[in-house]
Structure formats: structure tokens, C-alpha cells
Image: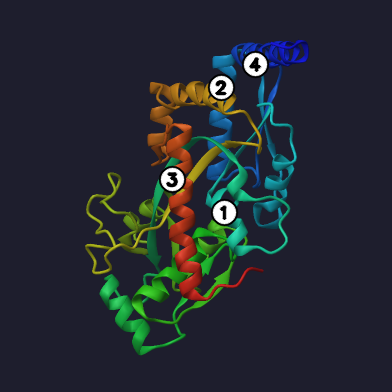
Amino acid sequence: MRGFELVALVVLLSTGIVQVHAQDNYPTQTVKIVLPSAPGSTTDILARLTADGLSRKWNKPVVVENIAGGSMNIGAAAVARAAPDGYTLFVAPPAPLSLAHLLTKNITYNPLDWVPITMLAKIANVLSVRNTLPTNTLAELIAYGKANPGKLTFATQGPTSTANLSGAQLEVQAGIKMLAVAYRGAQPALTDVIAGNVDMFFDTLATSVPLHRGGKLKILAVADTQRAKAAPDLPTFSEAGMPGFRSITWFGLVAPPGTPAALAQRINRDAVEMLRSPEVAERLKSLSLEAGATSPAETASFFAGETALWGKVIKEAGIEPQ
């Protein structure tokens, strides 16, 4: 072996050893978890639960930073620019992790470039409608929509929200036309459903089931492939006559583009252990959330599936990037 080849080999091996050693010692300083929404949301609760659990496991500070705005793209872009060293992580719902490139023009990051770590949790969406709407089943709603084209209204949190895409999916599969009404968040949308100012909202199981049981709104169907443990009396969309309709809200933990796979695996190990701990499992259950605790490969596969699902809806509904 020639001299320069030997030097190159030594450098390569020593670099690998340093990287492995650094990952074994990770973290040696404060880790920051960024989320692209304001405090108080389910995403925020999950981020802080994750930060607390990892901080105790690592015996190092893990802090949460809220960077809201721009349909969650401002926070996402900030993380995409961060060093891929494991000290800046990102917790978010679907849009900035798998959909933003399909819905938003001129974003400065690519959701396909994230390095997946794990799914934190997921929860089924449900179709919640105002009590005064003269429909009590999904079939009746579809019949009403066909008899009254353009009259039904559905609440959304903007064009990139799961609620908006779910409404579009319902329009396409049911062959009806509705009017989307944008709100600044889920809570004002729900308030207007309860008040009768908007007809329906694709909301999470956690917030709508108590309102349904309290007689403040009606849930027509659960948008998952199986009945919800928290509300086993409610039919799925498939059972209600719309096979294959699926809409869930989920929350992922990812690292900036370029983060080494070995480091992502290292963080995944601790995050999965944290999610499976009795304390965290009980907290997720109290929020009606199902723990993810997936491997990086499983997480990447799930993201790809969601991109394909909603990409098809976006194409069929003729939704143009904004």
C-alpha cells in the first residue's frame, strides 16, 4: 500500500471511530426540540412530554422551542438549516413532515429530506357535525350533500391541515361539493360547530368524543380502519359505507437532513424506551393517543405512505399549491 493510501485509510478509520465515540457519548450538551406551532396544542404537549422523558434518560437538559407561523413552515425551515448533529430535533404533525411540498409553493426545505427518528403518537380523526344538521349517519350526510350542492360547510385550519384534506377526500369519494371555512385553530372551529355556524369538522377523537357524549355535537364516523378503543360504539367510515376512507392525525420526531443514520438510531433507542415506559404510556392514554415507538425505517415507510395517500387526494381534488 502506497503512503498516501495508508494515510487516507488511517484518516477514514479514525473519523469513523470519532463519530461512533461521539454518538456513544451523545448528548454532551443541551438538546433543543423545535415545534412549528404555538404552546397549548397536542403537538406542544407531546413535545414537552418527549423533552421531559429524554432529559431524564440522558441526564442533560432538553428544551422546547415554539416557532409558529407560515402554515408551520417557518419552524420546519429553521430546523432544516440546523446542524445535523442531534442537538436540534423537530416534532410536528403531518404537513411539514410529509405534505408541505405538495401544498405550498416556494418553501425552503423538502419534507422528503428529514431523517426520521420515530413516530411519537397517532390518533384517529372523526367527522363531527352540528347537532342541528338533519343527518345522523354518513349515508344521510352524503345524500344531503348531493341534494344541496355547495351548501354543506366544513371547518379547516388552513389548506395544509389534515381537516382540509379530509374534507377534500370526502368530496371526491362521496361525489359531493362543499364549502371550506378556514379557522385559526381547532378550538374556534369546534366552537362554531357547536354553535351551529359551520356544519362539520374533521377533528381528533380526543376532543370530539367528550363533546359527542355531552350532546354538544354528533360524530358520524371514525376515519380509521378499525373502531376506536375510546369510542367502540362509533362506526368507521368503511362500516358506514365508504370503504378505504382514512384520516389520522399523527406526530413524528425527526432530525435535520444529513444527520448520520447511526445517530438517528441512537436517539430512536432512547425515544422508544421513553414512549414505552408505564408513565408515558399512561399519559398518552389519558390524551386518547396511541404510542408510535417505531424504528427509523418504519417511520420513513409510514411518512411515505402518508405522502402517497394525501398526494392522491390532492391530485383528485385538484388542490393547487399556494
117 lies left or right of 280: right
Q: Write down the residue under mark 3.
A: 302
* Cα gap from disc 1 to disc 3, whole angstroms: 13 Å
Q: Quadrant of the C terminus?
A: bottom right
Across and down, in percent, residue 78 comes to 74, 43
**Res 11 quadrant in image:** top right
Q: Position of residue 205 (x, y in %)?
A: 39, 51
Q: Amino acid at mark 3?
A: Phe
Query: Which quadrant, please, contains the N terminus?
Result: top right
SS type, badge 4: helix
Q: Are marks 4 and 1 in contact (CB under 8 Å)?
A: no
Mark 4–mark 2 Cα distance, whole angstroms, equals 26 Å
Question: Counting residues from the N terminus, which is met first, the one under dot 1 or under dot 3?
Answer: 1
Q: Which mark is residue 16?
A: 4
Q: Secondary structure at mark 2?
A: helix
Image spot of residue 174 (x, y percent): 34, 76
Left or right: residue 175 versus residue 201 is left
For the residue marked with disc 2, what is the amino acid?
Leu
Name the residue rendered at 37%, 82% in the picture: 145
- The label on residue 54 is 2
Going by the picture, which residue comes out furthest to the front? 2
**How far, Cα to Cα, is label 3 from label 4?**
30 Å
Of labels 2 and 1, earlier in sequence is 2
- Tell me which numbered mark, 4 or 1, is placed earlier along the sequence: 4
In the image, residue 93 sits, relative to residue 184, either above or below, namely: above
Which mark is nearer the camera, 1 or 3?
3
